[in-house]
């Protein structure tokens, strides 16, 4: 990579480290005002190795920020009722500031029912219907961590969002949809694409900001990227490969997130920061 290309890289790892430092300072303030150590509860159902790794990373960052981590591991045959009752108990526990239910959950579970058991004030991953609804209405709430982390990256790198043509590829409730809502809230003209989109490449070519959230390795080709576009690759596929053909997109992009080291670290940092903010809100501490 030459110097020009290196200068196009969005360093999510560095920004995430700063966000985590700020979250740690918030935790210190909360502790000194109340004597309470904020806690994040993580719930993992089953033994999916990727999910287990994500939870481990979240626990580690949570503890590094000075927070308590309450880890709940449930067997893969857990029923919807059992999971809902566990999440409800965490929701009622005054020692828990935020709840993260790692998804996907095993097929027999009604994931939506489990998410809805999280009270809104502890929904630090922005997964409940109320949290998502607030996001769409522009009512302050804890934003879904991956799109909220992407917004922080765009702000940090001075990307013009107002009036920009933004194309989000993917419409999942945890990523594509809230991403589109957040970009729209900041006055981008947003198009959401999905598996039934016709002439996808042509739609993407219009974009000043591309967010790829597809879950398919190197799905977005270099010639789909308009000269000067900002390329955000939220994808994370086996072998540390994103959803964008990075090598082909790099010469045309003005800014681009690498995989790994782009969006991923910001997701966890946002979760930790959201939890610190949730604790402050619950304990009446002004940060
Ligand atoms: P998902 O629920 O599987 O959604 C994928 C989306 O991509 C769907 O909306 C789907 O469209 C769309 N899609 C699939 N094939 C397509 C095609 N051929 N053309 C256009 N659109 C297509 O995935 P997700 O949970 O949103 O995750 C997306 C990616 O982000 C994955 O790589 C995941 O690992 C990554 N991710 C990263 C983080 C992080 O922290 N970095 C966090 C979460 C997810 P339909 O709706 O029509 O099926």
Image: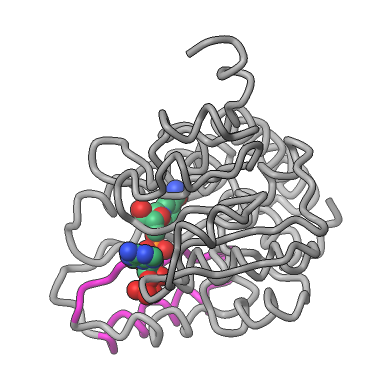
Residue lying at 45% horizontally and 63% vertically, measured from the top left: 200
Q: Percent x, y for residue 168?
A: 54, 61
Color theme of the render: one colour
Residue 55 shows in the view: no
Number of numbered tags placed on the structure image: 0
The quarter of the picture where residue 125 lies is bottom right
Q: Residue at x 60, y 68 (%)?
A: 191
For residue 87, what is the image quadrant? bottom left
Left or right, 91 with respect to 164, comes to: left
Direction from residue 91 to residue 48 in the image, left or right: left
For image coordinates 48% across by 73% down, the residue present is 173
Q: Position of residue 99 (x, y in %)?
A: 49, 66
Front residue of 98/148: it is 148
Q: Would you say 147 lies left or right of 71 here?
A: right
Above or below, 118 against 211 in this view is: below
Q: Nearer the viewer, residue 95 or 222?
A: 222
Q: For this rendering, which residue is in front, 273 or 175?
A: 175
Query: Quarter-wise, where is residue 282 in the image?
Result: bottom right
Q: Quick one: which residue is furthest to the left in this view?
A: 77
Q: Is residue 24 above or below residue 2?
A: below
Query: Which segment is the magenta one?
Result: 80-107
Q: Which quadrant of the render holds ligand 1?
A: bottom left
Determine the residue positioned at 51% across, 66% down.
Answer: 176
- 73 left or right of 76 in image: right
Q: Residue furthest right?
A: 286
Q: Can residue 101 be seen at all in this image of the molecule?
A: yes
Asked if residue 123 is among those painted magenta in the image, a careful observer would answer no
Residue 100 lies in the magenta-colored region:
yes
Find residue 247 and report its horizontal and vertical position in percent.
41, 28
């Amino acid at each position: 990579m030459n110097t020009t290309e290196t200068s196009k890289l969005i360093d999510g790892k560095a920004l995430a480290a700063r966000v985590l430092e700020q979250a740690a300072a918030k935790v210190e303030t909360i502790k000194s005002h109340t004597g309470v150590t904020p806690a994040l509860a993580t719930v993992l159902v089953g033994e999916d190795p990727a999910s287990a790794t994500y939870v481990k990373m979240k626990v580690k960052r949570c503890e590094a920020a000075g927070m308590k981590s309450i880890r709940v591991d449930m067997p893969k045959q857990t029923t919807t009722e059992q999971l809902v009752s566990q999440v409800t108990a965490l929701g009622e526990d005054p020692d828990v500031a935020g709840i993260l239910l790692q998804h996907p959950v095993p097929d027999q579970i009604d994931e939506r029912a489990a998410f809805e058991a999280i009270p809104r004030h502890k929904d630090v991953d922005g997964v409940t219907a109320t949290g998502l609804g607030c996001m769409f209405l522009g009512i302050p709430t804890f934003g879904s961590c991956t799109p909220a982390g992407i917004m922080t990256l765009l702000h940090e790198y001075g990307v013009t969002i107002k009036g920009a043509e933004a194309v989000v590829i993917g419409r999942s409730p945890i990523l594509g949809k809230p991403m589109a809502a957040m970009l729209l809230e900041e006055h981008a003209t947003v198009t959401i694409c999905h598996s039934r989109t016709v002439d996808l490449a042509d739609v993407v070519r219009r974009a000043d900001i591309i967010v790829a959230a597809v879950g398919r390795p190197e799905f977005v080709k270099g010639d789909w990227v308009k000269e000067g576009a900002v390329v955000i690759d939220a994808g994370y596929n086996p072998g540390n490969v994103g959803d964008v053909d990075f090598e082909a997109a790099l010469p045309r992009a003005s800014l681009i997130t690498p995989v790994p080291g782009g969006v991923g670290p910001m997701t966890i940092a946002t979760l930790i920061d959201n939890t610190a903010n949730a604790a402050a809100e619950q304990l009446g501490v002004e940060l």
